[in-house]
Image (spheres, rainbow, N blue to C red):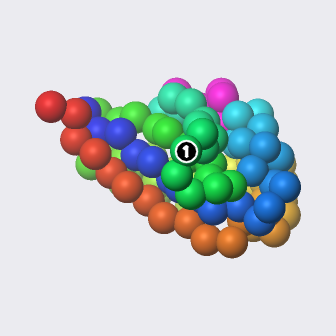
Amino acid sequence: MIIVHDIFICKPGNASKLAKLFKEVMSAMSEFDCVMTDMTGQYNRVIMVTKYENLGAYEKNFEKYMQDTDEMKKMKEMMKGYTDLYLSGSREIYRIM
């Protein structure tokens, strides 16, 4: 199993807005686990956590988001403007041992 952390460094005052948006939009997705916000370390950090059986499942799921289905159109509409809330981001993938 793998865990994926999509990490966003938000503009000041926007971390809670982005965390709430991710939680609302992603909660129906089976791979979604949780959204975390910083308590220590770098400020204004939001981490969206997802879980997959393996890298193949992750890649297959990622391809789903690239398709132009009604579900993806709805998600894109809900996420409209989210890039204005953060400064930078990164992704970390961990294998559960």
Residue 77: percent from left, percent from top: 84, 54
Going 80% across and 61% down the picture, which residue do you hit? 12
Tell whether 61 sits left or right of 3.
Answer: right
Q: Secondary structure beneath disc 1?
A: loop
Residue toward you, 2 or 53: 2
Q: How many marks?
A: 1
Going 35% across and 39% down the picture, which residue do you hit? 3
- Residue 42, visible in the rendered structure: yes
Q: Quadrant of the C terminus?
A: top left
Single out the residue that lies furthest toward the bottom. 87
Residue 54: percent from left, percent from top: 25, 41
Segment colored magenta: 25-30
At label 1, which amino acid type do we have?
Thr
Going 29% across and 39% down the picture, which residue do you hit? 2
Circle 1 is placed at which residue position? 40
Tell whether 89 sits left or right of 73.
Answer: left
Residue 13: percent from left, percent from top: 84, 55
Helix, strand or loop: magenta stretch? loop
